[in-house]
Amino acid sequence: MKEKLYTIPVHEAFETDCECPVCIMRKKLETNAIEFTMGPSYMEDDIREATSRLGFCEKHLEQLYKNQNRLGLALILKTHMDKIVKDIEKYSASVTKIAGPSFFKKKEECSEVVSYLNALEDNCFVCDKIQGTFERYIATIFHLYHNEEEFRNKFKATKGFCTTHYKILYQEASGHLNGVELNNFLKDLNTLYLDNMKRVRDDLEWFIDKFDYRYADEPWKNSKDALPRSMQKTNSILE
């Protein structure tokens, strides 16, 4: 592959006892990106320009807040808010200057404000920092599946994947594999996803049953942590 391979983090994730190794890889990237954002780098001009321009999604802003560097986050948000105010003033100024009734002109000018806000909502400095490496992680999974029997065995020994990452692997498979190998991969992927989704669903069902007095004296089996594991399977939530 022309792009850099990330075999070590991929192997390590697939060796982890978890409900989705891809979640493990992405979580590590998120942790590193949060630490980078709130580290000394936030004082660098190019980083501050990027955080001011892109801002953050709700999820990552909450993680930045939990990082405890409140002054750093305040400085980052101050410059981001300065840019929002400046941009909105620029895009909205022409609307107030329209002379006379002009419905279509007003609609066109207002759309500039809305387009700017839509772009703002779709951007996140942390998401951008993660995405490129995450995509190469996914490519590395297919590279290893194609080239290493050891990895194929690791792949088949996992506890499956969350729905989001199952979709990504299913969707990207045809771009990396073909023929019999593609069919084998999709068969393995589907079996892992469905069998383990059913396993966690059954654990969750037993967790629910344990709240019924008729099962009060029965063992918990594997259901005590069924709720957070179900949240990971359905929504990729990994604490």
Image (spheres, helix red, strand yellow):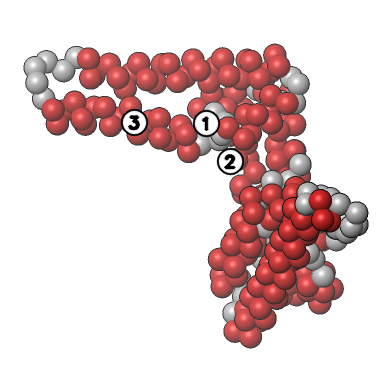
Q: 28 and 206: which one is in front?
A: 206
The residue beneath circle 2 is: 128
> Label 3 amino acid?
Val
Which residue is at a point 50% across and 17% down the rendered structure image? 81
The residue beneath circle 3 is: 114
The residue beneath circle 1 is: 54
Q: Earlier in the sequence, mark 3 or mark 2?
A: 3
Which residue is at a point 59% across and 23% down the rendered structure image? 48
Q: Position of residue 161 (x, y in %)?
A: 70, 61
Number of the front mark, 1 or 3: 3
- As drawn, is 178 to the left or to the right of 97? right
Depicted 137 relative to depicted 174: above or below: above
Report if the CB atoms under discs 1 and 3 are less than 8 Å apart: no
Question: If the image is split into quadrants, where does the C terminus sit?
Answer: top right
Q: Position of residue 171 (x, y in %)?
A: 55, 66
Depicted 112 relative to depicted 138: above or below: above
Helix, strand, or loop for circle 2? Answer: helix
